[in-house]
Image (cartoon, rainbow, N blue to C red):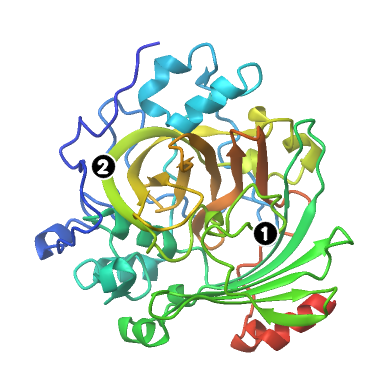
Amino acid sequence: MMKYKTLTSALTFALVAVSGSTLAAVTAEEAAELGKSLTPLGAVVGANSDGSIPAWTGGITAAPAGYSEGDHHPDPFAADKIEYTVTAANYKDYDAVLTDGQKALFETYPDTFKMNVYKTHRSASFPQYIYDGTIANATRSSLADSGNGIVGAGAGIPFPIPKSGLEVIWNHIFRFRGVDVGRSAGQAAPMKSGAYTYIQLKESIKFLSSAEDVTPEKLQQTNMVFKFKQSVTQPARLAGTALLVHETMDQVKQPRQAWTYNTGQRRVRRAPNVAYDTPGTASDGLRTTDDYDMYNGSPDRYEWNLIGKQELLIPYNSYKLHSDTLKNDDILKPGHIEPELVRYEKHRVWVVEAQLKPGISHIYKKRRFYIDEDSWQVSVADIYDNRDQLYRVAMAHALNYYEVPALWSTLEVFHDLQARRYIAIGLDNQEKMYDFGATLRDKDFTPAALRKEGRR
């Protein structure tokens, strides 16, 4: 099999080694390409040189026949066959379209880990007001306060034609995932043997920055990205534990506000440490707080460098993995999730490297993010420890929730290469499907509401 070459050297639009502190403005002429040679969110419309990545034609614009809101999402690409499989025996032939973390998974689990690669479908699509807002943002958005905040952005992607690594990571943070969302899902951190405890979570998220009526002035005034409430519903020993987060935009100016409810203490407490590298909820130490959603929170501890673009094999259109015909035991296997359920496709991604600032503390010294150009979803993250050794690799298994529409992950998996364990977050196969039409009020995200949630 002939090797694939990265897009970085082949295409003139690729950017190389652009500093995260470079804040070049987008010109009107550049912005005029949005909706023409670029998609409304800033991806390249055209196919790649060999056609293995097709042109974007609007993504999924209608649900498959027979689908009703509230159903698990049937696979619109179920008829696709595996085009080729990458294994420990041949992964070096695909070196250019794999990350170092993905290669490490082949080396760590040579007998069981593999990547089934399917036809690429550029299925990402979003509401028209997100497209319109993104085009408006292109020439009015700018970074503020050394990149810790944004000025001039309303609903939509703030930097569809990014000039720096910080702009790309803000696009991920601000990407559209609905407005009021209720979901029930779970997580599990299997032992080396494969044994696990299922942690069931109930979550409510109000994406304030994605509301249709959000203006730059309103976002600047509120400084609020979203409000998030989470409660553990099982196992019994953890049931009632709850978390509330008010996610601010500029967290240096106004730190994230967080509260926890502990059933043993029966009281709500402020939780200022729910940030950065604090271990995530019931994660067995296998992910940090800022790993959630592949990356969240203030970017102020890192220097962000835009490396460029490349073609990469990433999880995509993960409807099989999302299916309600599966049970958790079908997915969770020793070492990694069941590879036969995972669909990989070749897509163009932005590559951003985060390097810990001198004198700053975090268990991750370096993180390299691979961000899908069509959705601004972080698809893969390679994570390094303070010895400069590859520590963890994370992959987000995304699909188009076509009733919204929005492309978002159905499952995020963080592999700890040193512990030879992983945590899978977002298991929803046996849960009620996400409610993108939830009616959420500000009073649902108060400490009093958290106390009530924890006592249920």
Q: In the image, is residue 5 above or below residue 428?
A: above
| Residue at the spot of label 1 | 68
Q: Residues within 10 Å of mark 2 (few under 14, many from 20)?
A: many
Comparing 48 with 69, the one in front is 48
Q: How far apart are the two marked residues, 2 and 1, measured between alpha carbons? A: 40 Å
Location of the C terminus by quadrant is bottom right
Residue 308 circle label: 2
Q: If you read the primary sequence from the N terminus, does the residue marked by circle 2 or circle 1 appear first?
A: 1
Location of the N terminus by quadrant is top left
Q: Quadrant of residue 13?
A: top left
Q: Is residue 313 visible?
A: yes
Q: Looking at the image, is mark 2 or mark 1 nearer the viewer?
A: 2
Percent from the top left, x then y, of residue 324? 75, 46
Comparing 103 with 376, the one in front is 103
How many numbered marks have been drawn onto this rendered protein structure? 2
Q: Is residue 250 left or right of residue 294?
A: left
* Label 2 SS: strand
* Label 1 SS: loop
Comparing 364 with 421, the one in front is 364
Q: Residue at x 35, y 16 (%)?
A: 3
Q: Can residue 44 be seen in this view?
A: no
Q: In the image, is residue 401 above or below residue 223?
A: above
Percent from the top left, x then y, of residue 329? 80, 38
Residue 93 circle label: none
